[in-house]
Image (cartoon, grey):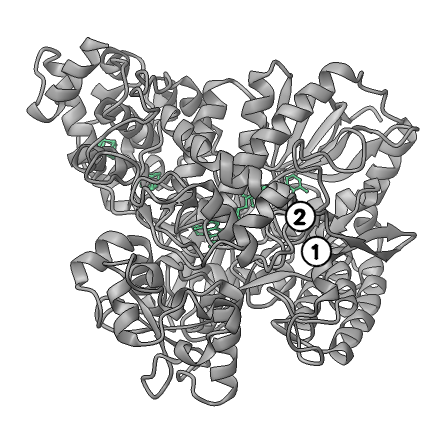
């Protein structure tokens, strides 16, 4: 069942680095992250790699496998031919810290710029009331595990470092849509989405949606509706009407 | 120490899971200058992995539910070893803690009336777990994370605390840490430190826990002079994945059973009916028909035995496997496919569906899962004051999994997330209060220099073994000798192995430099793992009975006299000292609750 795989792993730091070749044992059912752990335990104890849950829930183990942004804990070795050499490199859109670990502070900076959620008063009995159908739209976006694969793949920043200050990336544009569709939120962030977070720079290529490990339809369900809302600020889709009225009442 | 980065705060919270973030939010809101320090990136702590839900007697689905019933379930689940006052505060305050998450943007699943929906879980009399599909922990941590960011609280990500610093009078004065990316050292000066570091499961081979769970907070508290309570009680969750080997231990949420899934052995029998203990017989269904009716009519039927507390179910699975009635890969079958339609399963359990599909190539809407026990949660932890979460060391507080007492000998599912919120908030309040009245002592330069020397020691040695080997051997020892079923002889053997490993840790060497070096990080975690493993083993040897998450083959069943005693661990030179301490007496108005009919 076991075989020896050829791995090419990028090793280095901010000053540069290179792909290094390794031969590592692979057992049935293993994922790329298992193989890197075996490398650490047997050949390269200082190999830098992030992980936590090993089950696709925390979004820590993002890297590029044969050039594709992926979660290494969900990338099964079985999807490659045993004689294929597998290349693992750090996320390209972010500065390297060491080996496969990148400096993802761009994302945390954007999160800090986000105007927070503002709820209405609770009902007299201390509850907020919302219907399942109304929460589901934003719930889809709240499945986000902040793996930043979409941020890595989006061409607006992937090849244009200088766009970063003006563009929040799909994850945070989606966060704006999430708040906009939140049944309780009372802030209009549409102008901000356009002027400050760079929604207009997205040209709906859908590359972000394709890499999302949570299968979130980022472009179709978050970005495009948000763009429509920004373009016609007077237009209020029927599903939001009820909330808008309720909000005005308060 | 010129290259030391120094910071001054009122409250330093170590840990950015549910407990740490909730504590930080509260301390900040009470005016304390607050910092959070955590080993991973913000939003990646263990809390993110929690699946099933947050237990709170909100009564949204069953109006009959109230804090007294939740209190009773919690105490009975913990086999009455819980600190009654913690269990009471927890049951009383959990609903308010869940509701306030909605003010911060959380979006729970709803009832038809638009309230927060609640689901069934083992040991809870009523459907009580507020949830979002099977990704409740993600919702919880993201909500608290976004609140923390909105309040502008300082977060030191990817920083590991290696020591707590104390003043001459023994009170907390701060903490010493290193940045994982650069290897840079940091000193925090603060009169109040909240430990919210989570659990210890990484000392076991088969576990649902991540690399972070090396028991740092337990060990730091011991070193600062605090005591640990209930360390013999480890929760082996009955349903971890068993196949393929690389995913062994990864959790399969209890919601699968709460939502209708059943356990079967190789012969296709629902074996849990053969393992109903007398203690729970009155409230458990006797036939499959009654059990199945319970899902829709809870008033006239009793709960299925699959939903007994976790310790009971884990032991039953263990026995089936030992008796050769298990599944092909050494587990048993968990079947929801034949009982609920595919749509329902995908809607209620989307992340389980995804997890099995991706990692095991199993479609859980079409076939049964293979599951077996996995080391999941430590009931034991820092002994704290129930109202304030204060440890016995002045200025030290502990909340969440690192704290002990709340769950007694066994935790009910869903009671951890609520525990994080209730006692995280209480710790934040008390820490801010303490900081307001206690000035921060100056840090001892000698202590800082010592901490730095200790952290760099592994680089100075040559030719030793690598830290991964030592960790592997510890995991093997704990897994095989202090696991789900224990005997004196095996635990003694484990203690011998731990003693040898302590020597090996002193000699191991680390390759590479200080920049993001996981080998070095592990070398610094290992002494914590060994210290905490020793506590587990010593306490397990001491308690000569079986109760909750501690099963002694040589002392089967609970013993009356042990039902009145806690085992406490303290640091004693380089070793662990044990004390027995009587349980606090429960006031009569609460004791009454257990006399009411079951
Ligand atoms: C797969 C899984 C599913 C679960 N499902 C449920 C559920 O449905 N319901 C429920 O109630 N419970 C559940 N639990 C249990 C529950 O999730 C945990 O007990 C809980 O999240 C622990 O929270 P915490 O805040 O105490 O610690 P954590 O969330 O683990 O956070 C610990 C923090 O401490 C930091 N830390 C640790 N050591 C140091 C150090 N030396 N220096 C700096 N920082 C440090 C870590 O980086 C981390 O930020 C589940 C657990 C698992 C593993
Ligand atoms: S759809 Fe927009 S955000 Fe997504 S990758 Fe394309 S340009 Fe980027
Ligand atoms: S939206 Fe998807 S790809 Fe982007 S960060 Fe979230 S989970 Fe990752
Ligand atoms: S380790 Fe958590 S997503 Fe891969």
Query: Dot 2 corresponds to which residue?
Result: B404
Q: Identify the residue at horizontal 40%, vertical 23% (top origin).
A: A110
Question: Which residue is labeled 1 in the image?
Answer: B230
The disc at residue B267 is none
Q: Chain of mark 2?
A: B
Residue B278: image location, x then y, percent: 51, 73
Q: Is residue B234 left or right of residue A50?
A: right
In this view of the protein, which residue sits in the foreground, B231 or B74? B74
Q: Is residue B359 left or right of residue A232?
A: right
Q: Position of residue B263 (x, y in %)?
A: 36, 74
**Mark 1 falls within which chain?**
B
Compared with B274, B136 (above or below) is: above
Kindly check if marks 2 and 1 are in contact, taking CB atoms under 8 A apart as contact: yes
- Residue A173 location, quadrant: top left
Q: Is mark 2 within 8 Å of ligand 1?
A: no
Residue B283 in which image quadrant: bottom left
């Amino acid at each position: 069942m076991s075989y020896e795989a050829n791995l090419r792993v990028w090793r280095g730091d901010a000053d540069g680095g290179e792909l290094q070749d390794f031969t590592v044992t692979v057992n049935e059912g293993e994922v790329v992250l298992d193989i890197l752990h075996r490398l650490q335990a047997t050949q390269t104890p200082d190999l830098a790699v992030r992980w936590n849950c090993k089950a696709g829930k925390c979004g820590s183990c993002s890297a590029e496998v044969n050039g594709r942004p992926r979660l290494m804990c969900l990338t099964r070795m079985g999807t490659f031919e045993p004689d294929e050499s597998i290349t693992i490199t750090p996320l390209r859109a972010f500065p390297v810290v060491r080996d496969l670990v990148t400096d993802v502070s761009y994302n945390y900076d954007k999160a800090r710029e986000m105007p927070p959620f503002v709820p209405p008063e609770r009902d007299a009995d201390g509850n907020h009331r919302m219907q399942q159908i109304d929460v589901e739209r934003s719930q889809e976006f709240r499945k986000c595990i902040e793996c930043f694969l979409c941020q890595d793949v989006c061409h607006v920043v992937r090849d244009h470092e200088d766009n970063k200050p003006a563009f929040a990336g799909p994850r945070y544009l989606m966060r704006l849509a999430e708040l906009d569709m939140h049944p309780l939120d009372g802030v209009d962030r549409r102008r901000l989405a356009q002027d400050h977070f760079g929604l207009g720079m997205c040209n709906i290529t859908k590359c972000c949606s394709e890499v999302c490990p949570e299968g979130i339809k980022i472009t179709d369900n978050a970005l495009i509706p948000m763009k429509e809302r920004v373009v016609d600020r007077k237009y209020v889709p029927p599903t939001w009407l009820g909330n808008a009225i309720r909000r005005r009442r308060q | 120490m010129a290259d030391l980065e120094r910071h001054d705060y009122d409250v330093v919270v170590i840990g950015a899971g549910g407990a740490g973030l909730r504590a930080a939010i509260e301390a900040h809101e009470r005016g304390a200058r607050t910092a959070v320090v955590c080993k991973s990136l913000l939003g990646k702590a263990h809390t993110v992995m929690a699946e099933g839900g947050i237990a709170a007697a909100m009564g949204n689905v069953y109006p009959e539910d109230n804090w007294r019933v939740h209190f009773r379930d919690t105490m009975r689940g913990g086999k009455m070893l819980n600190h009654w006052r913690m269990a009471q505060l927890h049951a009383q305050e959990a609903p308010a803690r869940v509701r306030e998450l909605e003010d911060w943007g959380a979006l729970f699943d709803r009832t038809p009336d638009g309230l927060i929906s609640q689901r069934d879980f083992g040991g809870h009399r009523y459907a009580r777990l507020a949830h979002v599909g099977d990704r409740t922990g993600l919702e919880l941590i993201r909500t608290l994370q976004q609140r923390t960011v909105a309040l502008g609280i300082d977060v030191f990500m990817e920083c590991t605390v290696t020591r707590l610093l104390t003043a001459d009078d023994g009170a907390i004065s701060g903490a010493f840490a290193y940045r994982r990316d650069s290897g840079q050292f940091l000193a925090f000066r603060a009169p109040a430190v909240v430990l919210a570091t989570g659990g210890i499961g990484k000392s076991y081979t088969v576990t649902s826990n991540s690399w972070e769970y090396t028991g740092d907070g337990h060990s730091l508290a011991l070193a600062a002079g605090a005591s640990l309570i209930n360390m013999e009680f480890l929760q082996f969750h009955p349903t971890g994945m068993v196949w393929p080997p690389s995913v062994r231990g990864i959790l399969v949420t209890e919601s699968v059973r709460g939502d209708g899934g059943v356990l079967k052995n190789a012969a296709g029998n629902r074996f849990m009916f053969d393992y109903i203990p007398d203690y729970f017989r009155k409230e458990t269904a006797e036939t499959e028909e009654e059990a199945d009716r319970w899902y829709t009519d809870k008033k006239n039927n009793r709960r299925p035995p699959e939903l007994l507390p976790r310790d009971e179910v884990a032991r039953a699975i263990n026995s089936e496997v030992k008796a050769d009635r298990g599944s092909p890969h050494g587990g048993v079958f968990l079947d929801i496919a034949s009982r609920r339609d595919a749509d329902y399963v995908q809607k209620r359990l989307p992340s389980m569906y995804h997890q099995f599909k991706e990692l095991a190539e199993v479609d859980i809407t079409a076939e049964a899962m293979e599951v077996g026990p996995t080391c999941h949660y430590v009931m034991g932890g820092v002994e704290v004051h129930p109202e304030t979460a204060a440890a016995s060391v002045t200025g030290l507080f502990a909340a969440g999994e690192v704290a002990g007492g709340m769950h007694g000998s066994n935790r009910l599912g869903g009671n951890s997330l609520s525990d994080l919120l209730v006692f995280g908030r209480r710790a934040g309040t008390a820490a801010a209060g303490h900081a307001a009245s206690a000035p921060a002592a100056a840090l001892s330069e000698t202590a800082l220099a010592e901490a730095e020397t200790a952290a760099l020691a592994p680089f100075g040695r040559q030719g030793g073994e690598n830290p991964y080997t030592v960790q592997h051997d510890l995991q093997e020892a704990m897994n095989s000798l202090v696991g789900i079923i224990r005997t004196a002889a095996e635990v003694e053997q484990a203690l011998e192995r731990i003693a040898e490993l302590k020597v090996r840790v002193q000699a191991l060497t680390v390759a590479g430099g200080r920049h993001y070096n996981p080998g070095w990080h592990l070398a610094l975690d290992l002494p914590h793992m060994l210290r905490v493993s020793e506590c587990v083993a010593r306490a397990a040897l001491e308690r000569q009975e079986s109760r909750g998450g501690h099963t002694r083959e040589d002392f089967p069943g609970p013993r009356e006299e042990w039902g009145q005693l806690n085992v406490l661990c303290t640091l004693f030179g380089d070793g662990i000292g044990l004390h027995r301490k009587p349980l606090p007496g429960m006031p009569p108005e609460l004791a009454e609750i257990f006399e009411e009919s079951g």
